[in-house]
Every structure is written in C-alpha cells, then in structure tokens.
Image (cartoon, rainbow, N blue to C red):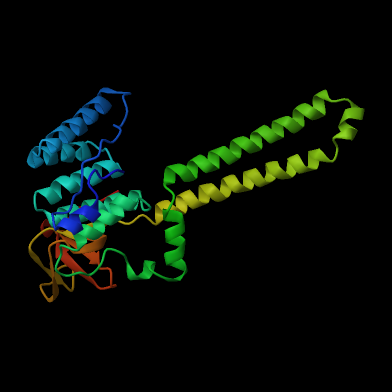
Amino acid sequence: MKIFLSLFVAFLFGGSPLLAIENAPGPGTNSSADHSIESLIDRGTASAEKGDWPEAIKSYEAALAAGHINAHLYYNLATARFRSGQVGQATALLLAARELRPSDPDIRANLKFVHAQTSDQLGVTMVSDQSGVRGTLRAVLGSISLRWWFFFSASSLALAGFLYLCMNVASMTLSDVARQKVAFVLPLIRGAAHASVALSVVFLSCGFASRQMVRTWGAVTAAKVDVFSTAQGNDVSFRLHEGTAFVATSYTGERVEILLMDGKRGYVKALDVRVVRL
C-alpha cells in the first residue's frame, strides 16, 4: 500500500494523520455482481479524491454490505471515516485490515497513528500476543495470508505429482541398462516427492491454523460507554471512550462481550461499538 504523503511529514509539520485512499484492484469481472461492487468501489474512490467523505463512506459501506471483504477496502473506508472525525469507526476498520494483512507496514503505521488520538490508550495488540509461544505462533502464521498458505500447499503437491510422473515415465521408457545408470537418482527423486507431499500437508495445516486464529475486532464508536459485568445486568465495571480497541468474543441479545488488550472482559451495548466480522 502506498501513502502518498508519509506519516513522517504529518508528524513533522503537525498536520492531521495523512491516511490516503489507495487505488485497489476490484473484485473481478466475472458477474454483474462483481461489476456492481467494482463500480461502488470506484465511486467511493472518486468521491474520496474530491474530499466528499460522506459519499465515499456510503459507497464503500455498500461494497462491504455486498460481501466484498478486502484489506484495501477496509483501509480506504477507515480513511474516509477518520477524515470525517470518526476515530472509533476508523480504528475498528484498520484492525480488520491488519487482521487480513498483518505485515502491511502502512496499515500498522496508520493504526498506530489513529490509536494515538484515543484517550484510553489501552493498545491495539493483545498482551498475550506480545510474548510466549502463542504470540510467536500467531505472529508467524499471521505473517502470511491464507491465500498464500494454500498456494504453497498446491505448489508442493504439484511438484510431488511432477516428480512421481517423472519416475513412472523413466521406469516405462528407459531400458534396463539406462535404468541401472540412473538407479542412484531415482531414490532421491522419490524422497523429494514424498517430502513435497509432506510439505503440502504442513502448508495446508498452517493455512487452516491461521484461519482459526482470525479474531473479530471492534472499537468503541460512542463518546463514552459503560462496560457491564454481565450480559443482562446493569452493574457497571468500568467505562471506555471512543476509539478503544477490543476483540468481540460473543453476542448476547443487544450486548457484545468484549476482551480488552490487557485481558479485561465485559459487556457493552452493540449500538455503542463497531464490530467487523471477517
């Protein structure tokens, strides 16, 4: 992702955070639905380039509602929301973008910048992810997208198939003398083929494991919210303010159970937060 004016310049000159709309590829052109979503994204980008943030938000949200889940779209919508003064909305959307592309430096930098505008300052990374085996495993698996894990798995499987094919062709076409000359090579090829199959399984398992680790992120969108100790009761444990990040763990009626970065839990009204389900 490319930010046309860097965050460094924003800090240097004291300006507002310079999240920039990026021209991302559309969802494809295989159906009328794809054309419709692509036109919504194009319309949103055109509105954003003119500084018409309400229209940009309207178009991007419509693309999301149509089922287009994409880190670029979340990033652009977050930009429009932030430019409209909606820190909580922008935080939730950037968290979702980071979940889809955890190693993207622009998403991480802008999330850090937006988080700096919040008052609670509870962080945007789970404490449990900052150290320990689980944190390391999540960092490693999350650094590669699900699509790439499946690509690696399919590539390894294709290589194994090619090697097995080579062995079969050699056994059927080579003469006995020729087979004796390359006899030392065949076990190496067979071993490489077996290893490729094993790698394919490993990559596939990593892909499924990374998918299981995907979190449902959210952020407070109201100026101030009460955090209740139970799903139904009215006992207030503490309060949070706009932009505070959390992980949504469950939904109970009109309330959302949240997990904060420091491990605290509670329930908030769904109308006071934005939760992004991936």
Q: Quadrant of the N terminus?
A: top left
Q: Quadrant of residue 120?
A: bottom left
Count of labels in the image: 0
Residue under the point 20% across and 39% down: 65
Q: Quadrant of residue 132?
A: bottom left
Is residue 277 among what the camera can see? Answer: yes
* Closer to us: 85 or 50: 50
| Image position, residue 198 (x, y; %) | 63, 48
| Image position, residue 52 (x, y; %) | 8, 38
Residue under the point 46% across and 50% down: 208
Residue under the point 85% across and 35% down: 182
Vertical order, 80 against 222 (above or below): above
| Image position, residue 27 (x, y; %) | 30, 32
* Closer to us: 64 or 79: 79
Q: Residue furthest right?
A: 177
Q: Residue furthest front?
A: 13
* Closer to us: 234 or 122: 122
Residue under the point 14% across and 75% down: 238
